[in-house]
Image (cartoon, rainbow, N blue to C red):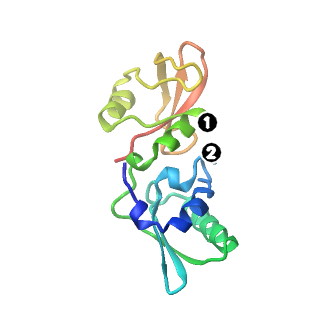
Amino acid sequence: MLDLSQNIEKQFIPILEAVSDPEIPVLSIMDMGVVRSAITKNEIVQVQITPTYSGCPAMDVIGDDIKKALKEAGYNSEIELILAPAWTTDWITPRGRKALEDYGIAAPLDAEADKEVLLNGKRIVKCTNCGSQNTRLVSQFGSTACKAQFQCEDCLEPFDYFKCLK
């Protein structure tokens, strides 16, 4: 997992932790790992964010939400989109992974396991309802492009799986 704590001034951490991911509102943008830095230069908070994938439609909303949250806290800000290095699911915090699971979205596996699940049908994605690994891929794409749709064969509940992105 990426540790950006040295690139984010401490006074901004609670403000940014209060900004939700617009597609997964139980996650903060900090838990998603999209905030790369937040530092003050010439009395302006300069925030760098990385999209979860290039062309992510949520980035404009995230930028606006960051500006609003900082403005409400008394800061003027600028948002910069950083594309390299590309965002990876490794940047999701442990708290973020737990929040995903609690919300009903299976957290991403590592890259090799992800391939086994999505390409070879291996049954290792745990159902977010009952915890069973007796699950099957329904569709390579779920509610968003970064998720796949699964169904538990034991409790029959459908759920999303957040694909591993490296």
Among numbered discs 2 and 1, the one appearing first in the sequence = 2
Residue 77 in the image, given as x and y percentages of width and height = 57, 77
Residue occupying image coordinates x 48% and y 44%:
146
> How would you rate the neighbour count of disc 2 (Cα within 10 Å): few for under 14, some for 14-19, many for 20 or more?
some
Residue 50 in which image quadrant: bottom left
Q: In this view, does 37 lie to the left or right of 77?
A: left
Residue at image x 60%, y 15%? 155
Residue extending furthest top? 154
**x, y percentage for residue 4?**
40, 60
Residue picked out by circle 2: 26
The residue lying toward the viewer, choosing from 101 and 9, is: 9
* Rendered residue at 57%/67% (across/down): 63
The residue that disc 1 covers is 103
Outermost residue, bottom side: 42
- Residue 31 visible? The answer is yes
Contact between marks 2 and 1 (CB within 8 A): the answer is: yes
